[in-house]
Image: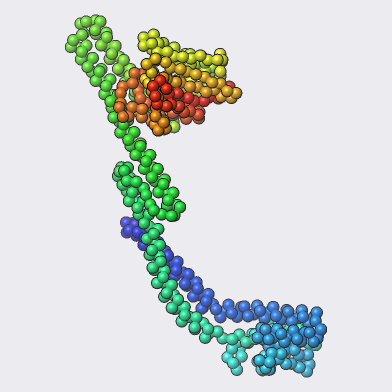
Amino acid sequence: MKSQKQNSMNKKIWSYLILFSIILLLFLWFFQIVSLSSYYEMQKTHTMQKLANQVKMNYQIQENDDFLENLELISYQEGICIELTDGVNTLSYSLNKNYGECLKSSYSQKYKEDFIQNNRSIQKYTFMNNQFQNKTLIYGVKLNDSLYAFLSTSLVPIQSTVSILRSQFVYITILVLLLALIISYFISKKLSKPIVEITLSAKELSKRNYQTPFTSNTDIQELSELTDTLEQTRLELLKTDELRKDLMANVSHDLKTPLTMIKAYAEMVRDLTYRNKQKREANLNVIIEEADRLNALVNDILSLSVMESKMLILKKEKFNIIDFIQKVLQHYEIFATNLNYQFIFQPTEPVIMVEADIQKLEQVFYNLINNAINYTGADHKIMIQLTPTEQDILIEIQDTGNGIAQEELPYIWEKYYQSKKNHQRNKVGTGLGLSIVKQILELHQLEYGVKSRTGKDHGTTFYFKMKKF
């Protein structure tokens, strides 16, 4: 099997083009040399049959003098012999003066007599004329009960013509094969070169070298599209690889930090504060908080993994989105009380019914509000706004932070993208929130997005639309 893979594309294309040239030459050789005699005879027979029918039709519609003139014209133009006979006196003559008495041979006489005796309408005869060593073709036509026409022509041997064509075709074959060798070589090189370049780049890609671009200077549409597709794939893999590295680094950081603190405070309780109830409880509370944060991070990673695998089944139900949001905001009263955060939500309608998986939609709101808490401005304001339309409702969650650059907006849904250059610990959440939001909204097939611009207090607005019921 290995030896079968060793043929390069260059050689394959070259061999196929040569094979095509040889097959084409064989076809030409067969039709122009081998079957030329048969084709000539077939065409001549077809012409004679047509002329025989024409003579019979002319006799029926033309006067005698006109008919004879027409016969002479046909004889002259087609280079054939035409003989008329009454069947009794066998009055016959040749109307083509160049051929003379060409139908007076004993070879043709018996066929004429056979035709007259059997009273046929039109009949074809072919025989070998030993005098001239060639085939003769005769068509007998019954004009009336006492008048017959015989059309004859010699199937002239074309062996000399075939011989000339054969010798000429030998030179043509040699020339065509030489040209095919040269042209197919350059064509194969032209076709294989961009594919070889693509293959080399693909090998680098398989080695996780995402820095080698896919380029090919070709005017072949399919190869150009393949190059563009592979280049786009390379860029996506490059981005994915960078995000993977950042994810590993950031997850490692977020896992290491609570583990370190849990270990440190546990040792502190063991060695120093185990007798001091107040300090011991404070240290244990830190341990509990860090364990909760660690548990939340693991849960988010597991949730994201399940959603990305498309194995999650939604349990949709109808509910009032106003009551739902107010219930979610109750969980953030501690931020308003202790840290002076303002959660502004002023619905214009008391009831707006929507349909969704309540638990998953809670994750969306928690993650978007947590994100707003982490990045809002010094005023600590977070706005939740509902804009109903006739069929839909637009839900927006806005902070007052410094905003996000426009070129970064398409990537903020990736894991840890927001903090990939300078990873810092979030006040709340795990850094995977927006990725989870994206997966949940896409599972619900909801339209979503983000609006932002950089600058102090410009803020960022995350939004999605839900259908009203």
Above or below 149: residue 312: above
Task: State the residue at coordinates (37%, 20%).
Answer: 374
In this view of the protein, can residue 298 be seen by the observer?
yes
Above or below 9: residue 363: above
Front residue (pair 61, 346): 346
Q: Position of residue 281 (x, y in %)?
A: 27, 8
321 sits left or right of 188 in the view: right
Task: State the residue at coordinates (21%, 5%).
Answer: 276
Q: Position of residue 294 (x, y in %)?
A: 31, 21
Q: Position of residue 82 (x, y in %)?
A: 71, 87
* Quadrant occupied by the N terminus: bottom left
Q: Position of residue 209 (x, y in %)?
A: 30, 43
Above or below 86: residue 408: above
Front residue (pair 383, 134): 383
Task: State the residue at coordinates (53%, 83%).
Answer: 161
* Quadrant occupied by the C terminus: top right
97 sits left or right of 306 in the view: right
Task: State the residue at coordinates (73%, 79%).
Answer: 54
